[in-house]
Amino acid sequence: MANSSSSVNTPTKAIFTPLKVGDNNLNHRVVLAPLTRFRASLEHVPTDLQVEYYKQRATEGGLMITEGTFITRLAGGYIQAPGIYNQEQINAWKKVTSAVHEKKAFIYLQLWHLGRAGAANLNPNNEQPVGPSNITISGSNFYGGVFEEPRVLEIEEIQEIVQQYRQAALNAIEAGFDGVEIHSANGYLLDQFINSGSNKRTDIYGGSIENRTRFALQVVDAIASAIGAKRTAIRFSPGSDYQDMYDDTVTKTWSYLTSQLQKDHPNLSYLHFIESRSGYRQEHYVNTEDSLEPYREIWKGPFISASGFSTNLKHAFDLSEKTGNLISFGRAFIANPDLVERLRNDWDLNKYDRSTFYSHDAHGYLDYPYYSEH
């Protein structure tokens, strides 16, 4: 899968130009997107597989974002997803950050809480999943079971979770990460509070846009005060319908979020926005949309655009040229550890094997060849 024109991806193009993100001087704007891969241990401790995986994809002056990482044991129970809530996990992540830094790359840890998308049988004492309201996600969960009705979080519990995010960020810095990305997208806990379809509360965390976004903004406040705004970032997915997300006023809601961050935390590392697209789970879907301009107009700092670029490289280059955005790649980075050089030289890409995305061994994880090995 080569780009059709070698003229669009020369090193002089915007995607290969330097940019400062926080205190990190990037050499290019090709970003490893956060990608859940389930290669941690059953105790949610990162493994040597992950050390090698991130090392393979590290480039000098490149930015990498880890897979979603649980902030506490009750933040989610996906089997073999990593955590950042105990010393064993911190020590294991240190091996990852050291390997990445040896290659002079930068790496942020994505902080994750599943909220109502979790499952009681994956919690240590069968604790009920939690959410903003007692609204159940339709359909089946990741493991083929039915979603459960979440327990409604009390105000005091929400404030406790804010502090859990803060501590997880401190743990990430102890583990050697250059910063953290707050996962506030894709129908997980913070996103559940933001969207009017999943949040029917009548207290200070529900109703108005100001109230529904309060939780996410408080998490940003807490983390920025703990580790510094320049090491803090957040990811959003406005308009996504994944896991039954729905909002009555999408542009207004996320414009408010963006404007509050611009006002209160203009020095955040970056904002990371996912393009909403209905066909993203289709194998050959090609994204050509750009609905993120309203948020770019508000946010003056580094901006990462995500979603669908692995199957439309020209769109990635063109968007970066037009906006100066960083572009995050998922599937293309899974199958091409040397993706940056392949894009820079217009080399063909390896094809990814979707059947290995969520398996637990090195196959489909560490064995994709570099271009020079062909």
Image (cartoon, rainbow, N blue to C red):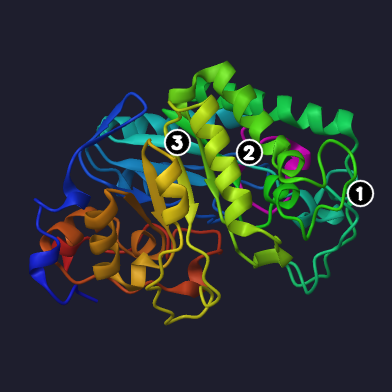
Mark identifier at residue 151 = 1
**Res. 320 visible in picture:** yes
Residue at horizontal 52%, vertical 65%?
A: 276
83 is within the stretch colored magenta? yes
x and y percentages locating residue 181 in the rendered image: 51, 38
> Is label 1 or label 3 in front?
1
Q: Pointers 2 and 3 in contact (CB under 8 A)?
A: no
Image x and y of residue 79, in percent = 68, 54
User: Which of disc 2 and disc 1 is earlier in sequence?
Assistant: 2
Q: Nearer the viewer, mark 1 or mark 2?
A: 1
- Name the image quarter holding residue 5: bottom left
Q: What's drawn in magenta, residue-wise?
A: 69-86
Q: Which residue is mark 2?
A: 83
Q: Which residue is mark 3?
A: 108
Q: Earlier in the sequence, mark 2 or mark 3?
A: 2
* Front residue of this view, candidates 363 and 230: 230
> Can you say which quadrant of the picture contains the C terminus?
bottom left
Q: Nearer the viewer, residue 74 or 52?
A: 74
Marks 2/3: CA distance? 14 Å
Residue at point 46%, 53% (across, down): 294
Rendered location of residue 342, percent (x, y): 18, 61
- In the image, 58 versus 199, the foreground residue is 199
